[in-house]
Structures are given as structure tokens and as C-alpha cells.
Image (cartoon, rainbow, N blue to C red):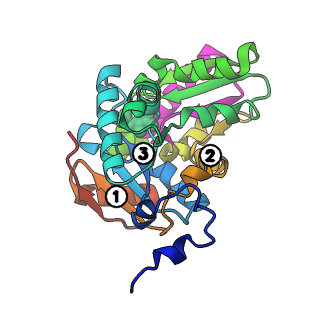
Amino acid sequence: MGVNVADMLDGNECREFVTLTELLHSSPIGVFDSGYGGLTILREIRKRLPQYDYLYLGDNARAPYGVRSFDVVYRFTLEAVRYLFNQGCRLVILACNTASAKALRSIQQNDLPGIDPSRRVLGVIRPTVEKVGGITRNGNIGIFGTPGTIQSRSYEIEIEKMYGGRCHTYGQACPMWVPLVENEEATGDGADFFVKKYITQLLAQCREIDSVILGCTHYPLLIDKIRHYMPQGIEIIEQGGIVAESLADYLHRHPEMECRCSRGGTVKYLTTENAGRFGDMASLFLQEQVSAAHIDIS
Ligand code: DGL
């Protein structure tokens, strides 16, 4: 069936922004994570914005990122962003906290202007920080994250910038939580020990904490145990819904980008590791069967 391009543009409110060539090429929203964790973000984004096409990329071959240096996380993340751009994505979400903490700012400020200033890369830390101010009652905020995210102090810096002295942050690295999830032990008895351990260590820093950010995309898979061991009255903040809402708001405020995101309602999964294994693990995160394709990005 032929497509009449003139019809596609006629009366189309995108007309002032989008060229004919752009309309004819699919431009999915790219969602990047070091591995599987970003699927918890993608799941919520698709619930909120099912109309768009998505291209998910998990760099499973080089995960975990959480223990890697700034330089390495930045290099890996930039390679992934370039790959997604080459696949037609004009907007890429870094669904990984570690990548958002260690690579986002450099990519936005130093790389994007040279690659294509009209493309965008967004992260997960700022939307979460924007939300937390309305959740905390006494300003004492705990952050669970990978060692890399906590060492970067990215949450602390953003919260300080946004709320000044009104909020105090307490970071707690949870190096065992990602391996527990990756090894399908999130609901096993062994997970209890490490969930209890990091909650205890966090609360030892400050007894008054009233809100805790799950600052890693894997942690929602431990949510039942985290809820179980977290004292009553402490708000546990998951990022999926927050990031989805923030993306919806971004697209609403940026019609020039919204018009370039293709609307087929499709999702494709790419992994730098074994495609079969990705499909099996992804079904854990998404509660649906998915099939993936293997790619090389380095
Ligand atoms: N997805 C990463 C994050 O949100 C954690 C996994 C990893 O260490 O690679 O921080």
C-alpha cells in the first residue's frame, strides 16, 4: 500500500517541524541501560506513552556498570548513545542511574553539540529529584544506589541545587543488590540478609530519614523485601512512574521533538550479550515474553 506523503503532512500539526524524509523514517525513543534494569523504566514509560516506538538497548556484555570508573562508564554510555542515534533515535533516555550519574552531563554538554545538536539525551536522576521535594516531610532523604552512583554524589548535588539547605541526603551503596537480581535471587532467602543490611546501614546514618529513593533500576525487583524490612512511615520512591511522567511532560513541552518520535506502538530489544538469555531475563522484569537481537557496539 503506497503512502501519500502530502496527505501525511496535510493538516498535520508537525508540519512546521518535520521534513518529509523524517516522516518516512521510523524514529523510536531509545532507552538505554547497562543491562536488564532499565526494563523497569521502559515498562512504566510504555504504560504511560504506549503510542510511540521504542528501541531498548542493554549493554549486558559489559554490565555491571555500578562498579566501573567514570571514564569507562562515560565511554560505554557514549558508544551506546551513538549506536541508538544511528538506528534513528532522536531522543535517548539513559534509564540507568549509574550512566546518568557518570556520563549524562558530559554527553549533553561536550558530545551532543558535535554529534547533532537537535538530538536529546535525558537521564533519570533529575526527574526523581524534582519529585522527592514534594514527598519528604522533614527533608531527610535516603538514597540507595550502586557504588558508582553513590560515589558520584549526583543525587546529593542535584538535591542541594534544587532545594538548598531544606533537604539533607544520605547515600547508601548496595553492591550486592544488582548481583542478587541478576542471579534470580531477588525473592530467595539469601536476599533478606543484604536487604536488611543496607537498610540498617542507611538508617544508622540518620534515624529521621522519611523518604528513600531506589536509585538503581534493578531495585524495584527487590521491592517486596525492601518494604518488609523498611520501618513503617518511610516512603519508598520507585523511579519508573516518575520517569514516565517526566518524559510525557518533556514531550508535551517540546513539540519539535514529539513530532519526530514515530508512533507505531512497537518495541524492539537489543543486547550486547546473548539474545536468548536476554529474552529469558527480560520476561522476569516485564512479566511478558520478549525476543531480542544481539548487536555489537564497541
Ligand atoms: N542499571 C544500573 C543503575 O540503575 C545498575 C546496574 C549496573 O551496575 O550495571 O544504576
What element does badge 1 sit on? strand
Sequence-first tag of 1 and 3: 3
Q: Which residue is mark 2?
A: 250
Name which residue type carries label 1. Tyr
Left or right: 211 in relation to 200:
right
Q: Residues within 10 Å of mark 3 (few under 14, many from 20)?
A: many
Contact, mark 3 vs mark 2 (Cβ under 8 Å): no
Q: Is mark 3 within 8 Å of ligand 1?
A: yes
Please state which of the two labelled residues, at mark 1 or mark 2, is closer to the viewer: 2
Residue 272 coordinates in the image, percent (x, y) = 24, 47
Q: Is residue 106 above or below residue 285?
A: above
Q: Is residue 44 visible?
A: no
Residue 107 coordinates in the image, percent (x, y) = 41, 30
Please tell me the numbered disc located at residue 37: 3
Residue, x 45% and y 59% (percent of image)?
286
Left or right: 74 in relation to 233:
left
Please tell me the numbered disc located at residue 269: 1
Residue, x 40% and y 45% (percent of image)?
32
Q: Nearer the viewer, residue 89 or 60?
A: 89
Residue interval drawn in magenta: 191-219
What element does badge 3 sit on? loop
In reply to whether residue 132 is colored magenta, the answer given is: no
Q: Nearer the viewer, residue 191 or 15?
A: 15
Instruction: Kindly report the distance in space between the C-alpha atoms of the residues bearing marks 1 and 2.
Output: 24 Å
Name which residue type carries label 2. Tyr
Please state which of the two labelled residues, at mark 1 or mark 3, is closer to the viewer: 1
Q: Residues within 10 Å of mark 1 (few under 14, many from 20)?
A: many
